[in-house]
Image (cartoon, helix red, strand yellow):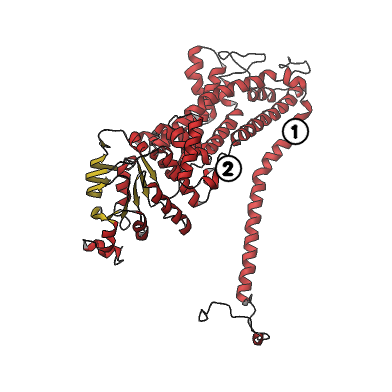
Amino acid sequence: MGVGIDVEHLNAWYGSTHTLQDINLNIPANHATALIGPSGCGKSTFVRCLNRMHETNPIARATGVVKMGEVDIYMDASPVEIRRRVGMVFQRPNPFPTMSIYDNVASGLKLNGFRNKAILDETVERSLKAAALWEEVKDDLKKKSGASLSGGQQQRMCIARALAVDPEVLLMDEPASALDPVSTSKIEDLIFQLKSQYTIVIVTHNMQQAARVAENTGFFLNGKMVEFSSTDMIFTNPKDKRTEDYITGRFG
Amino acid sequence: MSANPIQNPTPNTEDQGQLRPPMNFQTRRMRANSIWRYVVNNLMTGLAVLSTVLVVAPLVAILVYLIYKGASSLNLDFFTHIPAPVGEVGGGMANSIVGSAIVLVLASSMGIPVGIAAGVYLAEYGRGKTLAMAIRFTADVLNGIPSIVMGIAAYSLIVMRQMHFSAFSGGVALAIMMVPTITRTTEEMLATVPHSIREAALGLGVPKWRTVVSVSLRTASPGIITGCMLAFARVAGETAPLLFTAFGNQFWSFKLNEPIAALPLQIYVYAISPYDEWHRLAWAGALVLILMIMVSVTLVRIYAGRGVLKGAS
């Protein structure tokens, strides 16, 4: 089951650039939350702060409180622990090219020293089914490289890989932006199904996508969160003039 | 939809017979251009083929000449007997072949781990650090140092302290020669591993060291293996660093702290001798040396290439 995320006074910097300025936000458990906004507004930085991927860049730093359930992820846990609880799907599919489909999906467990074959088999099957990829790949799980799949299949495999470690939160940084419309709609269906079990945060440039999959939507602009409310409210009755300008296509 | 000008008109009998410009019409200039492109294209392809031949020709020539000169002296004795005393016919280089293998295994077991570890530091941990820059510079300088100097280094570090020549000191001299090549190739190959797949591993909660070993190094392994093989092949034929380290001998020896025979040394000794019989053996030795290098490189390639999956890049 997913957990909610409370973000208080989150600030982040890349070098001297203040990319996130005082973000306060409550992300409810077992819902999909969409983050929209023009390029460079800090959406990606924000989700990368939620699993401490932000700090893998040596010039980046962050301050503030991010609570995942009862756990303050910056105070109470190591980055490695947090990333096991928070799965991440990236903008471009990033399969491990040397690994088979099976090993790709099992990598989160295997690379952490997990060896029980029966449980690995079961986890791989369950994750691939959850990612709606099982039927397409079940015959060459160990024969084909993960990189030999099509772009859309690769992305679903990456989702399966993230699900295999049984996370509570799933972060998706523009998961469909490199995919064709058919694959995109498959990913969206998937998000729709997964959100009953996981807390999902999805960054998207596609406002229809946000409207289709997310209960709540946040609008980011220039490193600040301008508005956060239910998706219906954001798209039909935005409170802030800048949100309205953005969603009606007047800028950005 | 009938207003769509792109749509093909339905075939109409009245249209037939009307003059239309042929589909593949060309002006004279376009034709001249395409001839020019054809000529340039073929010229460039020809130059590329010629360059390939120029690169491969010396290797083939050396191999053919070695076979011509050396093959006749190759027999079972060559691989099973130690050198015969001057004046006696026969004898072989069995001890040199084994000695070379021992020294090369020693050198590889020291040089490859150190070289790869240094390359990993440069690529994964030392980005932008002063120490990394110093190491990189040192490796490049080390790469350009004449091999005899490596021999002197090993001589003064080990041989002078122990007061005797040894297989171990020869291995060290060759290992020092291997390190810079392996370090720089490892670094460059790791740099070609996309950052996105490192992030994929880190994002799954895999610790950094494990990401480096199981993702970065594994992805870069074909290139790193090539680098190791290049370094191996380079030192396998080195004579100068062994002259006053491994030193060479004329009998069986398997001890690491005693002088040991090596093919390049034996070839050198025989080649500068005044005896025709020894000259012939030197040719045979050179042929065996080059074949040994080719076989071991090929074997490693086949072994390392196994288990590559369909569609893996």
Q: Residue at (43%, 39%) from the top-left corner?
A: A164
The reply, left or right, for residue A91 in relation to residue B277 is left
Q: Taking B74 as reference, is A30 above or below it?
A: below
Q: Residues within 10 Å of mark 1 (few under 14, many from 20)?
A: some
In the rendered image of this protein, does residue A108 appear above or below residue A154?
above
One can see residue B122 in this view:
yes
Tell which of A203 and B24 is nearer to you: A203
Q: Where residue A70 sits in the image (x, y, percent)? A: 25, 36
Q: Which mark is residue B67?
A: 1
Please state which of residues A69 and B219 is positioned toward the viewer in this rendering. Answer: A69
Among the 4 quarters of the image, the one containing residue B206: top left
How far from the left and from the top, in percent, is residue A250?
A: 29, 67
Q: Position of residue B158 (x, y in %)?
A: 49, 17
* Residue at image mark 2: A140
Q: Are marks 1 and 2 on the same chain?
A: no
- The answer to which image quadrant residue A3 occupies is top left
**Chain under disc 1:** B
Viewer-nearest residue: B37 or A23: A23
Q: Amino acid at mark 1?
A: Ile
Amino acid identity at mark 2: Asp
**What is the spatial separation of the Cα atoms under label 1 and label 2, in whole angstroms?**
48 Å
Q: Quadrant of the C terminus of chain B?
A: top right
Q: Secondary structure at mark 2?
A: helix
Residue at x 44%, y 34% (from the top left corner): A109
Q: Residues within 10 Å of mark 2 (few under 14, many from 20)?
A: few
Q: Looking at the image, which residue sits at the far bottom?
A: B14
| Circles 1, 2 touching at the beta carbon (< 8 Å) | no
Closer to the observer: label 1 or label 2? 2
In this rendering, is residue B268 above or below B143?
A: above
Q: As drawn, is A44 to the left or to the right of A65?
A: right
Using the image, name the chain to which the residue with label 2 belongs: A
Query: Could you tell me residue A218's position as x and y percent?
Result: 27, 54
